[in-house]
Amino acid sequence: MTVVVTGASGRTGSRVAAASRAAGLTVRPASRAHGFDWEDPTTWAETLRDADAAYLMYPSDVGFPEAAEGIGALAREAVGLGVRRLVLLSARGEEQALPTEEALKASGADWTVVRASWFSQNFSEGPLVEGLVHGELVFPAGEVEEPFIDVRDIADVVAVALAEGSRYVGRTVELTGPRLLSWREAVAEISEATGVKVTYTPVPVRAYAETLAGFGVPPEEVGLLVEVFEGLMDGRNARLTDDVRQVLGRDARDFGDFVRDAAATGVWKSSGFND
């Protein structure tokens, strides 16, 4: 069984590719390095042709307007080429992502939507790392609680959904970790694991726009992300699901396990951390 994995070198795609290979599937990476470009539909057919299934993740945010257009168009082309089994990574609690989910469903595919809560790996991969390394995470989450999900669990669920399509066709699964943590508590666990004091400073969502711009986020995306954050950080996701266990037959990985694994790689170390 051949599966196309979009974003195969990214945070989720690389792990989906690994989990799919471990499940005995043949992985066909879909990235610019392999001739696939989300912004150039003429590159899609060569990647999709003769595949059996595909994992779809949009490279900016699944809630952006262009995501619904891109996912819908790619899904329709996939179905037209005989790739009917499609698994979409979506965001739990993000209302802006619903049009993208609907675009997938309208394509005629045998679809599964995987809605994930906030990634644990957002603390170890991406723009949040710099703040943690320098001893302060500034973020607009207030004291809201989130059931952080390990990306490795997302990948394992996606691999099952790809390999055992008939069980998950037409289903939406919501993936969470096994416990609720505030961002302050999450940062405290990272601080304890590294042995260096790291503080959490909550800021209003709209004040965070300047930080996003400092990360290099294009101005047109800043406003959209602020709108997304305003919704996600209102406490709507402060509840657990059992969907990881329902799919995998085991509990989701705990945030503490992620922290220990990440700390062991030295990702949060700087010259100050080594003093």
Image (tube, rainbow, N blue to C red):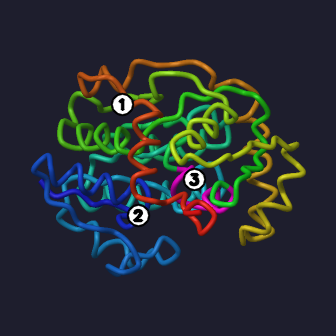
In this picture, residue 33 sits left or right of residue 27: right
**Callout 3 crowding tier (Cα within 10 Å): few <14, some 14–19, many ≥20:** many
Marking on residue 76: none
Q: Give the residue type that dot 2 points to.
A: Gly
Marking on residue 68: 3
Q: Above or below — where is 247 with respect to 207?
A: above
In this picture, residue 48 sits left or right of residue 182: left
In this picture, residue 144 sits left or right of residue 255: right
Q: Give the residue type that dot 3 points to.
A: Ala
Horizontal and vertical percent for residue 20?
A: 21, 51
State the residue at coordinates (36%, 81%): 33
> Disc 1 or 2, which lies upstream in sequence?
2
Task: Pick out the residue farthest to the front.
Answer: 275
Q: CA distance from mark 1 to mark 2?
A: 23 Å
Task: Identify the element where label 3 is drawn.
Answer: helix
Horizontal and vertical percent for residue 266?
A: 46, 59
Task: Identify the element where label 2 is drawn.
Answer: loop
Q: CA distance from mark 3 to mark 2?
A: 17 Å
> Disc 1 or 3, which lies upstream in sequence?
3
Q: Give the residue type that dot 1 points to.
A: Gly
State the residue at coordinates (23%, 68%): 49
Q: Determine which residue is flagged by label 1.
A: 170
Camera-near label (1 vs 2) is 2
Decide whether the magenta segment is chiefly helix, strand or loop. Answer: helix
How many discs mark residues in the rendered view?
3
Q: CA distance from mark 1 to mark 3?
A: 18 Å
Horizontal and vertical percent for residue 13?
A: 37, 57
State the residue at coordinates (67%, 46%): 197
> Disc 3 or 2, which lies upstream in sequence?
2
Q: Determine which residue is flagged by label 2.
A: 7
Q: Nearer the viewer, residue 109 or 256?
A: 256
State the residue at coordinates (23%, 49%): 19
